[in-house]
Amino acid sequence: MSAYSSEDVRDVEALAQGIHRITKGNWTVMEVCGGQTHAILKNGIDQLLPPAIRIVHGPGCPVCVTSMEVLDRAMEIASRDDVVLCTYGDMLRVPGTKTDLARIRSQGGKIRVIHSPLDACKVASEELRLGTGRQVVLFAIGFETTAPATAMAVRAAHMKSLPNFSVLVSHVLVPPALQAILSDPDHGIDGILAAGHVCAITGYEAYEGIADQYRTPIAVTGFSPVDILRGMLAVVTELESSKGDTSRHTRVINAYSQVVERCGNVAARRALDEVFECCDQVWRGMGTLPQSGFKLRSKYQALDATERFASETSSIACPALPTIQSHCRAAEVLKGKIRPTQCEAFGKECTPAYPLGAPMVSNEGACAAYYHHQSRNDPDVLGGSSR
Amino acid sequence: MADTVAADTVTVAADLGVLSMCLAVPGRILSVESLSGLRMGVVDFGGVTQEVCLEYTPEAGVGDYVIVHVGIAISKLDPTRAADSLSTFQEISALPGRP
């Protein structure tokens, strides 16, 4: 079933032709959004582009970059008899150092899959009403897109004075990660597609400084094939027209203006500022990046699950993960240094059923996207003609 | 046009699995109300309706399209701006091509 109209097809063709026509140099363009990774692979957008344009995938999947330390902390908390841990379905199979949340749940751990952080407030109210004595912990991960929803839940819990609600915060911010990638002299990236829904919240003023400092054009880009090609055309146009012109400012182009404004969402930014302050954050595969995460401000510190469950031991015994000798190159995939198919383990010992690295676990991870979609076009991806 | 966008993104959402937390989906606001002090609304995602928090989109009312992420509307969709930017890029792509 196709969800695309003939108008979409016409726009895709026009945009792809435009890109072919203007491309003269060789350009590597990085996207930093799991949704875009998936859309690019699913729709074969990489194959519509001239061979001179190479797409690489950055740290765009929040599940994939959540640190081992935070995962282990969540698992420790989820293993307690008196806790209900609320989190997104993507998190259940992400391996920590010893186990994963799905295994803890199979041993009786109370883990609720939520669709919105506000659901966690509802669960807390319900546990309170039933008098179960259970604590409800929201395991909050995600980029700037998701953080305002966490802020909303924190404010709602604070307003209602829910005594049994707390939050394990592990939000990450995109601009510091881009800076870290572009600071590496060997990054090899010519242009960037910025994630449209992150920018819907934050706006793109912070990206203007990055584009100029690293002389790397950035296009704020949406998620449909038309949106992605529009972002690509904008970046390639900027690259081609600024070639050899060192006096020119490198720009951010808003190629998703139906959703994104330069200042972002003012109400959401205000809520973020009220609830969180920036802190250093560990990214899986990238290490500690300064001022790249959020922590609760002191006003909301009583809701911090890390403090509420400090130095407590778990009460549910968890089966350990099998130890695997890993050839996993997830860290290089996350930095856009290699494509998933360049990893020796890809599609062999590492598959969505038996993932070695986080980008294969989450549906939005680059490795999972390549596994699911590229096999259609390139049977070699899955190790030969047997499939 | 916005309906096509909605249908498209819902398909992607289905591909990624309903449990995915990273995706934001456009939907049309059917009704607005205040619930426990929060501005909430019922939003239609191509036939599936869901309760959505509208606190961050105070400018969006009944009939408007919003982009919804984990139960919260994060932006009001303006389809006219999409049309504008497309024509701009068509102009851009009329730049001199390969020799």
Image (cartoon, rainbow, N blue to C red):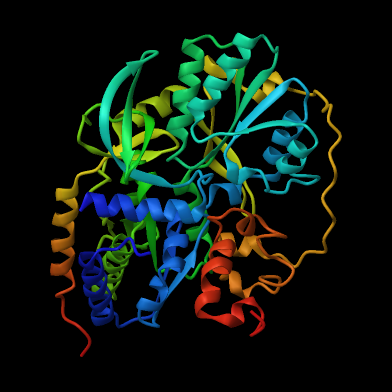
Q: Please state the horizontal and vertical placement of residue A8, each as a whole percent of the image.
A: 24, 65
Task: Give the quadrant of the N terminus of chain A.
Answer: bottom left
Q: Residue furthest bottom?
A: B99
Q: Is residue B61 left or right of residue B26?
A: left
Q: Quadrant of residue A74?
A: top right
Residue A255, image x and y in percent?
26, 57
Closest to the observer, A111 or B7? B7
The answer to whether residue A257 shows anywhere in this view is no
Location of residue A179 in the rendering, given as x and y in whole percent from the top left corner:
47, 53
Asked if A86 appears above or below A157 in the picture, the reply is below
Q: Quadrant of the C terminus of chain A?
A: bottom right
> Is A272 located above or below residue A20 in the figure?
above
Q: Which residue is at 48% across, 42% downward?
A: A143
Q: Position of residue A243 (x, y in %)?
A: 29, 75
Q: Is residue A330 left or right of residue B91?
A: right
Residue A58 visible within the image: yes
In the image, what residue occupies the spot 33% across and 43% down? Answer: B47
Q: Left or right: where does residue A9 sit relative to residue A305?
A: left
- Residue at x 32%, y 67% (from the top left corner): A232
Tell me which residue sits at (35%, 50%) in the image.
Answer: A196
**Quadrant of the rendered image containing residue A148:** top left
Q: Is residue A300 above or below residue A76?
A: above
Q: Is residue A303 left or right of residue A275?
A: right
Quarter-wise, where is residue A134 in the image?
top right
Report the label total: 0
